Image (spheres, rainbow, N blue to C red):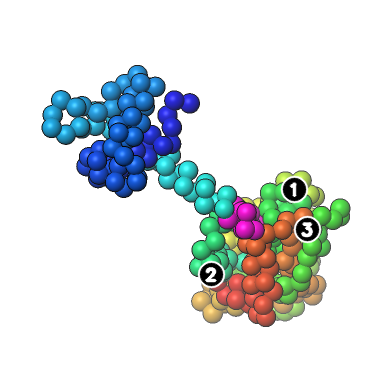
Amino acid sequence: MRISLDGLLVLDAIDRKGSFAAAADELHRVPSAITYTVQKLEQDLDVKLFDRSGHHAVLTPAGQELLKEGRHLIVAAADLEARVKRVATGWEAELRIAYDDLIPAAGILRVAGEFYRQQCGTRLRIGAEVLAGSWDALASGRADLAIGAPGDGPAGGGYSTRPMGSVEWVFAVAPGHPLATLPEPLASAEIVGYRAVSAADSSRNLAPRTTGILSGQEVLTVHNLEAKLIAQRSGLGVGYLPRFIVEREGAAGTLVAKTTEEPKVSVPLHLAWRTAHRGKALAWFLKRLQQPDSLEQLLAG
């Protein structure tokens, strides 16, 4: 490659300081070294970077373009250097997090904000998953940490888990839905005649899961829990939602909670991570999310 990082640093210093001499001062070099670096860059690229016809050398259009794009490389190189140093001290370059979408994104991002205050430089890649999706992300290597993974994990190992608590589910319908006025508890024979709303499992490799659907019941499948909530509020179907959501929607008059003869059992949620992963960023999240009331804080958004 004919463009050197050192050459770009020299061009940047000349442009910011206004002269070859001032750039030499900033870079702690003699002026002749600055001149040599520029001349060599011009020879290697076979272009004129400075117009020297006046009293002061001025960047040519080619020089301006090289400096403009070259500054991105300077920043990227500095960032890479810093990351390499951080990795050497035990901080991961990137931590990939999957969370079950019944946890509000606001709760996850609040914890991410706490992490960023550590100023460790680890990049976070955060994605929401549905049902077995968070387990799948962990098992397939798409994630290093799963937050709120529901139910049991897949066979095969390679990961460690800690319980986070559980989420209660409540059957809910729109106020104008025919089931809203029927006496409780609702029987399965009454529910099966109405369309259910289901959030599609986001798992790519593990067997997809479905919950709360009766045999023979018509199903509207949507892509996540938020869409399921909107569909049920709109009266497009019925189904189970987390208690904290139903209580909030009930207070707003947008959903009606109904008891059923065969209620959906509470689902345990887990914190799970790849056992082979060793890093300070993961350790920080594990410590933070195993604090008392962490799940309640996350669900509060």
Nearer the observer, disc 1 or disc 2?
A: 2
Q: Which residue is mark 2?
A: 114
Residue at x-position 75% and y-position 78%: 185
Could you say which disc has been placed on residue 284 in the image? none
Q: Say whether residue 91 is left or right of residue 27.
A: right
Q: Secondary structure at mark 1?
A: loop
Q: Nearer the viewer, residue 193 or 72?
A: 72
Q: Which residue is mark 3?
A: 275
Q: CA distance from mark 1 to mark 3?
A: 13 Å
Task: Establish if 173 lies above or below 37.
Answer: below
Q: Is residue 13 visible?
A: yes
Residue at x-position 67% and y-position 65%: 283
Q: Secondary structure at mark 3?
A: loop
Q: Amino acid at mark 2?
A: Glu
Nearer the observer, disc 1 or disc 3?
A: 3
Image spot of residue 189 (x, y percent)? 79, 66
Q: Nearer the viewer, residue 65 or 132?
A: 65
